[in-house]
Amino acid sequence: MLRKAGQKDDFLKAKIQLASALGAIVGSLLAPIVGGVFGRRITCFFLCLTSLGACQWLLNGVHQFDGLFLVVTGLAGCFTASLYGWLPLCFPEIFPTRARATGRGLAFDFGWIIAAIGVLHMANLMRFFDGSYPKAGATIVVIYILGMALIWLASETNGRPLPD
């Protein structure tokens, strides 16, 4: 079957999106289970660490489109999206009942604000790195280091009653 110009690119983009989405599904389903077994803080630390590692590997370690690229894309999707499966479990447990919805909302949505700042500065970073998307992206994902540090300020809530 002959493909028109551009169809091959669309097919490759679809494969990349599928690998990322499948990884995201797996990560979002497994993260709450892992958090329940190992505790909230260590799970968050692990998810930030693996997200950082997978993103750095994808941006700096894979240089051609092949099976490895799809596997690493799936891993990056798994670990980065796993936080969205885990955070709704963790955040409500940190706040007392009277502030639970507000606290959870602010804490969860603060990540979106940070992500927006990163997106808005991507062009500046690319200009700084002479147009290199991988270098600019690898710079942005170091935000996971902040997450790894901040999680130790939160209390461990696994197995404890919700605060009143």
Image (cartoon, rainbow, N blue to C red):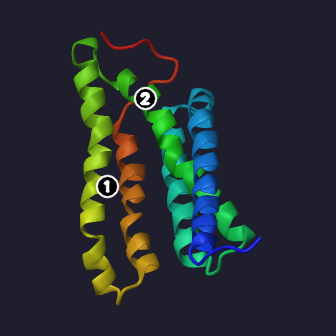
2 over 85 or under it: above or below? below
Residue drawn at x 58%, y 49% is 21
Disc 2: which residue: 88
Disc 1 is placed on an element classified as helix
**Residue type, mark 2 in image:** Pro
Mark 1 is surrounded, within 10 Å at the Cα level, by few (under 14), some (14 to 19) or many (20 or more) other residues, namely some
Q: Position of residue 14 (x, y in %)?
A: 60, 59
Q: Position of residue 144 (x, y in %)?
A: 41, 56
Residue drawn at x 66%, y 75% is 65
Residue drawn at x 35%, y 55% is 146
| Total numbered circles | 2
Q: Nearer the viewer, residue 157 or 73?
A: 73
Residue 115, disc: 1
Q: Earlier in the sequence, mark 1 or mark 2?
A: 2
164 over 7 or under it: above or below? above
Q: Report the side of 37 relative to 48 (left or right).
A: right
Q: Are marks 1 and 2 in contact (CB under 8 Å)?
A: no
Quadrant where the C terminus sits is top left
Residue 106, disc: none
